[in-house]
Amino acid sequence: MFDTPLIDSLLIRLFRFRTRGFMKMEEADGQVPPVPAGDAYLYVHIPFCEVLCPFCSFHRVQHQVAQARTYFATLREEIRRYHAAGHRFTGVYFGGGTPTCEPDELVATIGLVRSLFGVRDISVETNPKDLQPPLLEALRAAGVTRLSVGVQSFDDQLLREMERHTKYGSGADTAERIRLAAPYFPTLNVDLIFNQPHQTMESLRRDLAIFRSLGANQVSMYPLMTSPTVQRRMDRHMGRPDQRRLRQFYQAIVRDLSPDFAPSSAWCFTKSGQGSDEYLVASENYVGVGSGAFSYLDGTLYSTSFSLQAYGERIRAGLTGITTQHRLGDTDRMRYTLLVKMFGLGLDREWARARYGRRFFRKLWGELRTMEVLGAAQRDDHGWRLTGRGMFWLMLMMSEFFESVNTYRDAMRAHVQEELEGYNRPCPQLAEGVCRQPVFS
Ligand SMILES: C[S@@+](CC[C@H](N)C(=O)[O-])C[C@H]1O[C@@H](n2cnc3c(N)ncnc32)[C@H](O)[C@@H]1O
Ligand code: SF4
């Protein structure tokens, strides 16, 4: 009775209203933020890509060899700065863009992070084309525990629409490469996107069947998320997603992946049912380094500069890349915690009490009760567990939150549009040349 588009849309409106203050960023001084009370993760952003896919909502620029090498060296300086200020991390996530665009630089940076922090988990994002034995060997030797491959779909028609077919290979090539790479790492994750404008149910189910045949043990199923800029680009290249199809697609995903793949968050499914793709689920606090990265530390959100030039200058001047910040109010902080915990499948009552005291249950009574009444969460001796029904809504809410982050990215990138356009020139040092498609038109 509650699984209707009307309830979905009411919940999203309510969520939007309740979280409207999350991204109100203000200017920051760029000093290293205070060390948080609990564990923290390190997120390292590498914005370079060989192809700038039209649907992509992340901060990325055309890969240029010399510039990328300088950028990695700057990143290492920034990481040392956090270490010197007393920050410690239990895991590291190299995201992008494409962190494997400069393998030697990436390996040197992993080495530095390991030597400074002795991290347990090392996660790296890559594209299907980079899945070659020398790189796989190098990443395994560097201690990478999770490799995440951006596949998006195995459907050649959709790959063409996404402008990935020529550079990153056909669906069949990609499948072969994943089969080869899967045994190298404890976790091999595949990213797939659902609700693409011309995706059919058959195509999605074929993607899932192919994924299941490859020996990879994790899949992140992202709903296609947009922002005004991404949408405009997609209008020209791919069309518009139809939000009314989300529920049907999501139900097919959960059905087709079970029982061997169990959810580890509302959009990540893992073979053993353990682990999660999300650094924001793995640890409440995280520090983001590099250009266009976010941090969350003890209730404050930070963002670094989206200008690669300004980022380099700030690090040379002895600062971090941070240019804006927003200290969440007490209730917003608790709401953020609730969102992240429920997205990660459940909230532990004792943990919440220790973290915030009894006021957590008083302030969020409405949210917790609504989840129970709608059947999105079940209360037990330990706290609140997300139900199958709740998974769909948490997927929607996290996607809504990411879209608000995308809108912030749009605004920040618009400030430095001229600089970013300058990166979109062919790089003479890249063996095969680069994509010349105008991205900021
Ligand atoms: C930052 S990319 C890194 C992977 C690598 N660069 C590649 O594309 O092969 C990480 C993942 O974000 C997801 N992603 C990017 N833009 C998205 C969007 N607009 N909606 C949903 N997922 C998106 C894709 O699944 C992608 O694999
Ligand atoms: S999807 Fe991956 S390769 Fe494409 S632009 Fe985004 S980060 Fe780069």
Image: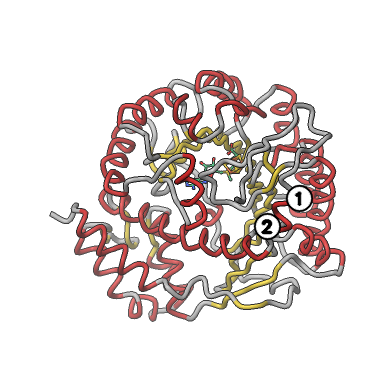
- Mark 1, secondary structure of its residue: helix
Q: Residues within 10 Å of mark 2 (few under 14, many from 20)?
A: many
Tag on residue 113? 1
Q: Nearer the viewer, residue 90 or 1?
A: 1
Tag on residue 89? 2
* Relative to 399, 27 lies left or right: right
Q: Measuring 65% from the left and 54% from the top, which residue is drawn there?
A: 43
Q: Measuring 48% from the left and 33% from the top, which residue is drawn there?
A: 161
Which quarter of the figure has residue 212? top left
x, y (%) of residue 80? 81, 59
Which quarter of the figure has residue 400? bottom left
- Vertical arrangement, residue 63 with respect to residue 113, above or below: above
Q: CA distance from mark 2 to mark 1?
A: 9 Å
x, y (%) of residue 343? 40, 55
Q: Measuring 52% from the left and 50% from the top, which residue is drawn there?
A: 278
Question: Ligand 1 is found in which quarter of the picture?
Answer: top right
Amino acid type, label 1: Val
Q: Measuring 81% from the left and 41% from the top, which residue is drawn there?
A: 105
x, y (%) of residue 71? 80, 51
Sequence-wise, the earlier of marks 2 and 1 is 2
x, y (%) of residue 184? 63, 26
* Tags 2 and 1 touching, CB below 8 Å: yes
Tag on residue 42? none
